[in-house]
Image (cartoon, coloured by chain):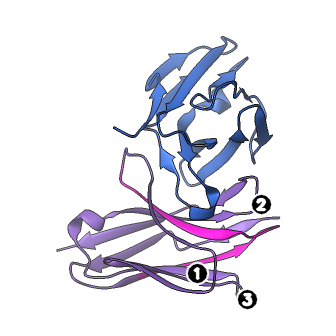
Chain colours: A purple, B blue
Amino acid sequence: GQSLEQPSEVTAVEGAIVQINCTYQTSGFYGLSWYQQHDGGAPTFLSYNALDGLEETGRFSSFLSRSDSYGYLLLQELQMKDSASYFCVVTTDSWGKLQFGAGTQVVVTP
Amino acid sequence: EAQVTQNPRYLITVTGKKLTVTCSQNMNHEYMSWYRQDPGLGLRQIYYSMNVEVTDKGDVPEGYKVSRKEKRNFPLILESPSPNQTSLYFCASSLSLGSGEQYFGPGTRLTVT
């Protein structure tokens, strides 16, 4: 079967750094995306890795190792507004079939 | 304003009464997709479409139909809704899957009694 594993919850204080890991086992792999979703809201795109390495976008960075079937999202200088759920998503074929992780709830405390 | 719209946003219906949730995007995106979100399960893909008249099944297509007659619209049809289809539904679109970026609609909360 196919699976994406990520922690269910992470708690950290403002200003800290949080790393959300995602390990995947899928029938195919074209890329790994990360999305943020606040309670009651729609998911919003954060980053995408198709090749190994680190992608940096402001306070957020994402890393991929295809050989290890592993990626992570790094949130730096945490702010209260970063309290949300974060999903990793694998694109499993070239036609657009996607698999989502169950999501990681990030709780930022003062 | 570039956006994905869904209608209705909220719907309560009864078992067996056919319904359609509309999805429209104004960004000329080729790719569109439907998801359902249930507590503890994350989002699961129902159907997706790479282009007009091209659709394919995601992980949970049973009980749903879609059509893609125009690039901008991708309606989700429940021919005979059942209580296990009570969920939060999202439509999304993307210019290119190569970017990994999808734009999501605001969601439709469906309750089937």
Quadrant of res B73: top right
Q: Which residue is drawn at 73% across and 88% down?
A: A67
Q: Is residue A76 left or right of residue B35?
A: left
Q: Which mark is residue A67?
A: 3
Q: Which residue is drawn at 53% across and 49% down?
A: B39
Q: Is mark 3 on a helix, strand or loop?
A: loop
Cα separation, mark 1 vs mark 3, equals 10 Å
Quadrant of res B42: bottom right
Mark 2 Cα-neighbour bin, 10 Å: few <14, some 14–19, many ≥20: some
Residue B37, compared with residue B84, is above or below; it is below
Residue B23 rendering spot, x and y as whole percentages: 54, 29
Q: How many marks?
A: 3
The amino acid pointed to by label 3 is Ser
Q: Which mark is residue A93?
A: 2
In the image, the segment drawn in magenta is: A19-39
Mark 1 Cα-neighbour bin, 10 Å: few <14, some 14–19, many ≥20: many
The amino acid pointed to by label 1 is Gly
